[in-house]
Each structure stands twice: as structure tokens, then as C-alpha cells.
Image (cartoon, rainbow, N blue to C red):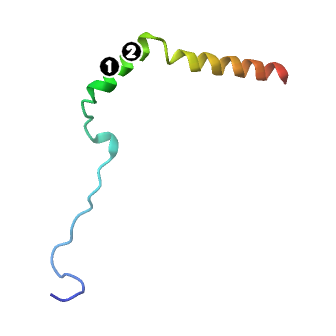
Amino acid sequence: MALGKRSGEQQGEFWTATPSLPGGPGHVFYDKLNSVLAKAGFDTRPVRWAANSVRQACKVC
């Protein structure tokens, strides 16, 4: 076998857009964790904290 260019078929481009790929089912542990955190209102605390910080920063200006 010699090094060089092949004289036969060319391989086509192999590219797939990520959004067109099917999503997986996820993991049971993380599904349960997300539901527990949502029930506890975990996600709302950082949002409220950030909103208060922005309000205080705007009062200073």
C-alpha cells in the first residue's frame, strides 16, 4: 500500500446538526432530584436574591 491520493470514491461530509438529534430519556435520579427541588422552591431563592441585589445596586446609583 502506497501513500498518496485515492483514485476511487470520495467520502461524503459527515455532519449532523445537534438540534436534529433525538433527546435521551434522562436519568431517574435527576428527574426525582428536580421534582424535589421544585417542590422546595429551590430555584426561586437565587432569583429573588439576585432581584434584591439589583434593586439595592440601582438605589445607590
CB contact under 8 Å: marks 1 and 2: yes
Q: Residue at x 84, y 22 (%)?
A: 60
- Could you classify mark 1 by the number of other residues whose Cα lies within 10 Å: few (under 14), some (14-19), or many (20 or more)? few
Q: Residue at x 23, y 64 (%)?
A: 12
* Image coords of residue 27 (percent x, y): 27, 29
Tell me: residue 3, above or below residue 44.
below
Spatial separation of the CA atoms under disc 1 and disc 2? 6 Å
* Image coords of residue 24 (percent x, y): 25, 34
> In this view, which residue lies farthest toward the right?
61
Looking at the rendered structure, the kind of residue marked 2 is Val
Residue that numbered label 2 is attached to: 36
Q: Secondary structure at mark 2?
A: helix
Q: Quadrant of residue 57?
A: top right
Q: Quadrant of residue 51?
A: top right
25 relative to 1 in the view: left or right: right
Tell me: residue 28, above or below residue 11.
above
> In this view, which residue lies farthest toward the bottom?
2
Point out the image quarter for the C terminus. Answer: top right
Looking at the rendered structure, the kind of residue marked 1 is Lys
Tell me: residue 2, above or below residue 18.
below
25 relative to 51 in the view: left or right: left
As drawn, the label of residue 32 is 1
